[in-house]
Image (tube, coloured by chain):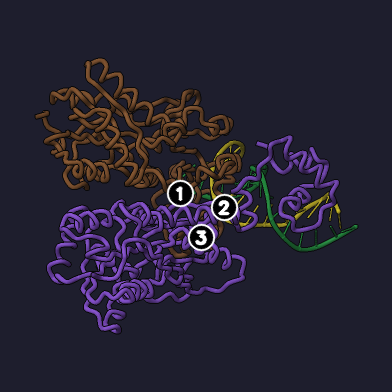
Chain colours: A purple, B brown, C yellow, D green
Amino acid sequence: MATIDDVARVAGVSVSTVSYTFSGKRPISAATRARVERAVRDLDYRPHAGARALASQRTQVLALMAPLRVDVNVSVIMQFVTGVVTRAQAFKHDVLLLTQDDHDGIERVAAGSMVDAVIMMDVEAEDPRLPILRRQRQPAVLIGLPRDPTGLSCVDLDFEAVGRTAVDHLAGLGHRQIALIGSPRAVLSRRTTYAARLVRGFTQEAARLGLEAVFETCESSHSGAIDAVDQVLTSMPGVTGLIVHNEVALPAVLEALRSRGKDVPGDISVVAVCPEDVALGQSEPLTAVDLPAHTIGAVAVDMAIGRLTGEQPAETRLLAPVLTTRTSTAPPR
Amino acid sequence: MATIDDVARVAGVSVSTVSYTFSGKRPISAATRARVERAVRDLDYRPHAGARALASQRTQVLALMAPLRVDVNVSVIMQFVTGVVTRAQAFKHDVLLLTQDDHDGIERVAAGSMVDAVIMMDVEAEDPRLPILRRQRQPAVLIGLPRDPTGLSCVDLDFEAVGRTAVDHLAGLGHRQIALIGSPRAVLSRRTTYAARLVRGFTQEAARLGLEAVFETCESSHSGAIDAVDQVLTSMPGVTGLIVHNEVALPAVLEALRSRGKDVPGDISVVAVCPEDVALGQSEPLTAVDLPAHTIGAVAVDMAIGRLTGEQPAETRLLAPVLTTRTSTAPPR
DNA sequence: GTGAAAGCGCTAACAG
DNA sequence: CTGTTAGCGCTTTCAC
């Protein structure tokens, strides 16, 4: 492996000049730059990441703590991850992947100076990892919204607004009896706040507009979906509008409606809350509030880099929901 | 941040003693060890990863190059990834996540000494990344099987055997006309070899047993599944056995069979090739050849670590398939 | 516009 | 069983 000394020797310059040629932190004459670049190419030189980290206090690595459980909405997690990795590349950063169950993972990589910043997904209201995060010298960005975000950057979809938007859409079409099929019970009791925030927006907006509204949790399985649909049809036989916030159960929910003789949107209008590709991948294109997971991941990186460069303080950003009307919603009969 | 010098001073020992206390590379008296550990705790000391990497030529990081396209079998990819991350933890390694489209990612992290080894998923027959991999000083492990694996470790499910096993199961039940609904055309033409290997095993075994056999590609969407089912029913009206090697299309395939009036397993027996949780998450538990993605990821790490410690040479490991009989297969009427 | 040299924090000879 | 010290390869003052 060639070192910076080798490059300097071959190019006939000092090591500092080689270093500055890379960093651009001081002017280099065109001629010198050319000779350095030549030597770099000839020697196939790559700076040693560890040496660089040691000297510069920067690793060009972001930690991403992701919930790698296979149960919930894997494709959404994946989209967050790709959003983060792709955007990180734009800032010349790589991504170190940590899992939820790696309990002192954050501390290990942050305190050990392996990373410049930490991005954490799947944040709960009273997340026990937050104190650890606040104790580190690296900035942290949460995907999700804890009860107390002091000192931490947060980004998420505005799920209360999602609930309101979906209700408004159905109400605008004339629906008066609506239902929400939501996240698994485990997600709600884990106090991952997005599920509860959506329920709150749904409930409050329905109340404000004087609609009848019911809410059912839904396990992420075929049978869970069927149970939820039957629950809804039993407790509210006159339901004409349905909001589904559960990507995994979505196909089975639609199938269950069909098998119960409910035409979509003839008998029941369906608004999904899911990534666009999921809404388009069903048996018919669904009216949906987009879950812009890829974008959220990218924004998380932007906020992390902003903190690193000292341009931005810690702040909370809630993205406004966008509903796209497709063929699964219509006025009630 | 406390350094090793601080620890040494507080503990009243030399830095080498502190270092050796950590690494265990030389005996330390119980008394000394206790004082060092005390100091470490008091100072909340963590070794600086960069400094360590610089001095030891070891980063305790594995690179994982994963195909983060959202199109194909996301949940399978996720299982590979969790398998890798989980097993890496057991060896005190973290995982740096690279994406397929990050073209010089491997070279950057390997030549820059950011990682100790590289694990690469989704390998194609003539993968252009292999020469780059071979050029690095770090060992590489492929998940998949290229045409020429010289110098590289490989691990994968034995997909030819999978094809044979599935055919044997159906043949054993008495089926004589069988079909395979496989991967999307893009996967086959990309020359990811697993798809083709399964087809080969399927075709050869069917020929050997004198069965009628047809094969259809299948796009990973609702409509793709329906098309594939209709193709099969058209080209082989008497089909009674069906093998499905496409996790994404699987639910839609089952639904399409049902809607075409085909009872499973009454009219058609179905063998899936997919992870266990997918086989169990359908409307009924499917007879399936398990795709042990988590295990394969773990084995990849074992092979990487084995190479690092000099215990193992580069080798290819093909895991034997396991078929579990559930309720979706039965003798033909 | 360029160079010399002092670290960054650790590991692993070498020395006892 | 423990200590001393020379690097590991880079960044960044300080000096010209």
Q: Element at badge 3?
A: helix
Disc 1 to disc 3, C-alpha distance:
38 Å
Q: Residue B22 — which label?
A: 1
Relative side of B25 to B205, left or right:
right
Do we see residue B298 in this rendering? yes
> Residue flagged by tag 1: what amino acid is it?
Phe
N-terminal of the pair, mark 2 or mark 3, is 2
Q: Quadrant of residue B304?
A: top left
Name the residue carrying label 2.
A89
Residue A327 versus residue A209 in the image, above or below: above
Tell me the mark number nearer the camera, choosing from 2 and 1.
Answer: 2
Quadrant (top left/top right/bottom left/bottom right) for the N terminus of chain B: bottom right
Name the residue carrying label 3.
A298
Instruction: Residue at 25% x, 20% y: name it.
Output: B206
Q: Element at badge 2?
A: helix
Disc 2 to disc 1, C-alpha distance:
34 Å
